[in-house]
Amino acid sequence: MADHYDPLETRDPSEREASLFARLPEILRQAMHSPAYAERLQGIDPAAITSRGALATLPVLRKAELPGLQKAALPFGGFVGEAPGSFGRLFTSPGPIFEPEPAVADPWRSARGLFAAGFRRGDVVLNTFSYHLTPGGFIMDSGARALGCAVIPAGPGNTEQQFELIEAYRPVAYCGTPDFLKILLDGAAASGRDVSSIRRALVSGAAFPKSLQEEFSAKGIEAYQAYATADLGFIAHETSAREGLVVNEDIIVEIVRPGTGDPVPEGEVGEIVVTTLDPHHPFIRLALGDLTAIMAGPSPCGRTNMRIKGWMGRADQATKVKGMFVRPEQVAEIGRRHPELGRLRLIVTREGETDVMTLAAETVTPSDDLAAALGATLLSVAKLKGTVTFASPGSLPNDGKVIADERRYD
């Protein structure tokens, strides 16, 4: 057990799947006590939602919708059945989006990811995520303290004061963005400050390229990354295997085609959709707008949960063409009207001073009749004309893009 947080991490995947979907119906019943979910899930029998296929029939809630929904029904858009006073902390993050923190231990499920990064009981942790209004600092703080660590609530910035704290308390672990860790290390080297106590790090909130990982490692710091959001807490985290990110326990992750709620085949890039089994503040199929893909097989570290490739871009690919927005949902609608097609990709370019749309479609049976039918569907759905080209099955890029804006204005 020295390498794993608990036995849940190494159980048979079928056992995990059965446990998650045995618990889901009760979470749905509790969610439907809130007015927003009662309306969205009207006519749904929670007892029937016991598989991924059944879950995929429920509507997707897009994170981009939350600011408007919450503004219309403050503070939580009607998606929370409990009063604000029943929670431990209340936050806001850019949008604005209002987030409650349940008054329970490790409310953001972050301890497991910190453990995978090497954090252990008795460690002193320098936490440089913000504690001001947003949940970032508390997401890491609560998980570290659940592990039995002592936390320095440093927040970002004030490097001189950070150096004083590091030299006084000698933290062995760091939480924060990779960028700020580099600022601290470079600043310490330039000013002769001693930050050599830091040996482990859990970073998030910014890109963490391999070059930066190697730079930290050369300075004696093993840094791991986590994928987390202010709404959901920890979703997935890196492990010692360094092969993708392992999905957290107690949540259900789906990867869907952008603009839809339809799951994609394993390995295909799509949008991350998360369902949480939190009875206090459940999220049912929250689409985060981020792209990733599922990796095949379990992690070499012994953890058996689903692995994802990490952040691979944004799913919100809406773009303006001739003054009108074209959205992934419209491309998805074209696909629904022509189920015989494979992947679709709407490519936007410029010819002279004019926007041009080309719909590329995978098919085994290209024809002039099919091109004409697709062109008519494109005009009907997008209210704009475009040309149609065909591609062989599997030949369009597997990058999650259904709209590729390739215009240049040089």
Image (cartoon, grey):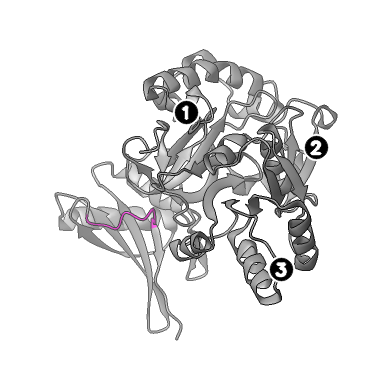
Local crowd size for mark 2, using a 10 Å CA cut-off: few (<14), some (14–19), many (≥20): some
Give SS at disc 2.
strand
Query: Can you give x and y, in whole percent of width and height, for residue 222 in the image?
Result: 52, 53
> Is 40 placed left or right of 269 in the picture?
right
Q: Residue 17 at what x, y percent from top left? A: 43, 22
Q: In terms of depth relative to the viewer, which is nearer, 86 or 63? A: 86
Residue at screen point 42% across, 79% down = 408
**Mark 3 residue element:** loop
Pointer 3 residue: 193
Identify the amino acid type marked 1: Glu
176 left or right, relative to 24: right
Give yes or no for contact between labels 3 and 1 (Cβ–Cβ under 8 Å). Answer: no
Measured in 3D between alpha carbons, the distance from the residue under mark 1 to the one under mark 2, in whole angstroms, is: 29 Å
Label for residue 339? none
Up-down: is 188 above or below 304? below
Foreground residue among 208 and 74: 208
Q: CA distance from mark 3 to mark 2?
A: 36 Å
Q: Is residue 392 above or below residue 25?
A: below
Q: Quadrant of the C terminus?
A: bottom left
Identity, as a three-letter code, of the amino acid under mark 3: Arg
The x and y percentages for residue 157 are 75, 64
| Callout 2 amino acid | Arg
Query: What is the C-alpha distance between the residues marked 3 and 1?
Result: 39 Å
Please give the residue where the numbered disc 1 appears in the rendered image: 9
Q: Which residues are magenta?
A: 395-402
The residue that label 2 is drawn on is: 89
Mark 3 vs 2, N-terminal side = 2
Q: Nearer the viewer, residue 115 or 94?
A: 115
